[in-house]
Image: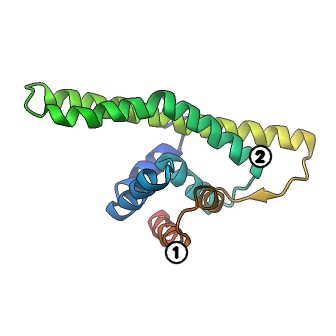
Amino acid sequence: MTSTTTNPYWPIICELYANKQIQQQCLGWQDNYGANVNWLLLAAILQQQNHSYTQTTLEQTSQQLEEFSQQHTRLIRQCRYNWRSSEQNPNYQQLKQQLLKTELQFEQLEQQLILDSLNSANEQAEQVQQDEARSVPFDWLVEYHRLPKQQAEILMTQIRSLML
């Protein structure tokens, strides 16, 4: 599990996600467009901090994240969703909380995977002195998933206001 001492973004993302409007928007994009909530929020923060990356880096990061999420995080999430049909089970709440805790641990691992991928690519780009155009991560994800731009602008405005 990633600790918040090595990843300062996790508590910020948790705080942003606690906002019901942000949560609903991100979950809607997850359900309707296949966007990863963790990546969306981290990308918004990184963009707010003026980070940019090559399109190749963003694509590779998204692919790595998709593979990890498919193999791990989504399985736990699906298990948690399926468990809802077992509300009559005397251990329902306890197991539901354990599944949620496990899912959050995998989401932290996803976030670390994103950061490691971006940092590694930036180090390589500095060594090679790549001339490839750079993109800001949130705007790139909006295009990548074909998310509604007006809603994306509203979400980014909400995130900016919460980060002040």
At x 44% / y 32%, what residue is drawn?
A: 73
Q: Which residue is mark 2?
A: 56
In the image, residue 56 sits, relative to residue 153, either above or below, namely above
Counting every numbered tag in the picture gives: 2
Q: Which SS class for mark 1?
A: helix
Inspect this view and state whether residue 78 appears: yes
Amino acid at the residue labelled 1: Gln
- Which mark is first along the chain, 2 or 1? 2
The residue type indicated by label 2 comes to Thr
Q: Is residue 55 left or right of residue 140?
A: right
- Residue toward you, 61 or 109: 61
| Crowd around label 2: few <14 · some 14–19 · many ≥20 (10 Å) | some
Residue appearing at x 74%, y 44% in the figure: 57
Residue 66, image x and y in percent? 57, 38
Mark drawn on residue 150: 1
Above-or-below relation of 63 to 17:
above
